[in-house]
Image (tube, rainbow, N blue to C red):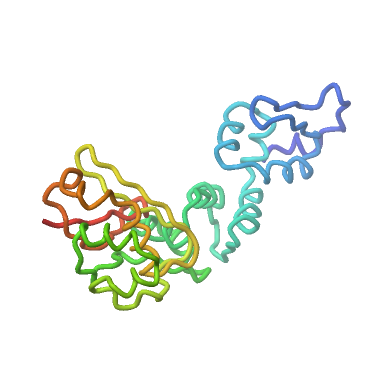
Amino acid sequence: MNDYYRRSPKRSPTKQRLLSKQIGDVTLSGNYDVDKRLLEYLDIKTLAKLEQTNKYAKGILDDQNFWKERLRYRLGLTTKLKNFNYKHAAKFLDNGYSLGTNLAKARYLRDKNIIKLLEENGVKAAPDNLLGSIKETLYMLAELGQEPYDIFKSSVAGLRSPDAVVHTGDLIYHYKQLDVYLTIESSGDLTEGEILYDIAKALPDDDDIYQVFGDHIYFEGLSVEPEGTYKIDLGS
């Protein structure tokens, strides 16, 4: 933190810093504590750009207390760890994914401080696999996906606990093979049945299944990736 900015005298309106290019028509006051509050409302990408282009704002963004408060107010996270890098944690976690997804990513990257922070706050990692018990072809899922949800969840082979919540927060899962790319996003308290139903509704008509997926027509569940997203596993 640069003490110069804490001790700066009040600036006249003509000397206030107008950051219109970076954050819209927002005028910083020159008062360190006031401007810190203003910056807390900005998204992480805007802050990253601002840090590179504005020396005064960078002085605020180099303050670990700024990131400590941001972590607490935006994500509800606190820690008793000593010498903790709050700036790294806030940038790592403020990405739109659930905390459970971020914990899975942190474990893959072996980021011990992020892991300790999340576990200290009672966060549970997203499971490595979901829906592995399903025993249906894409043809059947595509057909059942046209039915109302109550009929769907009672008709899928292997869907043992359709109403069991298996993921809370944002969930992104996709299938990528050659030129085929299917991405689905869900959010909230998600059950096995709801996740599978979203996948079924996103599939093409059963007449087009082979043309799109070839021999990979057996649904085999979802497996977590390093980024914390899920890959749709298909078998032949």
Question: Which residue sits at x=66%, y=36%?
Answer: 59
Q: How many marks?
A: 0
* Side of 228 where 31 appears, left or right: right
State the image coordinates of residue 99 (x, y, percent, origin top left): 48, 60
In screen coordinates, is 97 left or right of 73?
left
Q: Is residue 165 above or below residue 143?
A: below
- Residue 146 x/y as whole percent: 34, 59
Q: Nearer the viewer, residue 153 or 16?
A: 153
Q: Quadrant of residue 233?
A: bottom left
Residue 16 in the figure: left or right of residue 110: right
For the question of whether residue 147 can be seen, the reply is yes
For the N terminus, give its image quadrant. top right
In-image side of 11 versus 161 (left or right)? right
Q: Is the residue 46 above or below the residue 221 in the image? A: above
Asked if residue 109 can be seen in this view, the reply is no
Q: Quadrant of the C terminus?
A: bottom left
**Residue at horizontal 55%, vertical 48%?**
87
**Could you say which is closer to the camera, residue 4 or residue 126?**
126
> x, y percentage for residue 178?
19, 39
At 60% from the left edge and 33% from the top edge, which residue is drawn? 51
Foreground: 193 or 109? 193
Residue at image point 22% right, 53% down: 206
In this view, the residue in front, 206 or 115, is 206
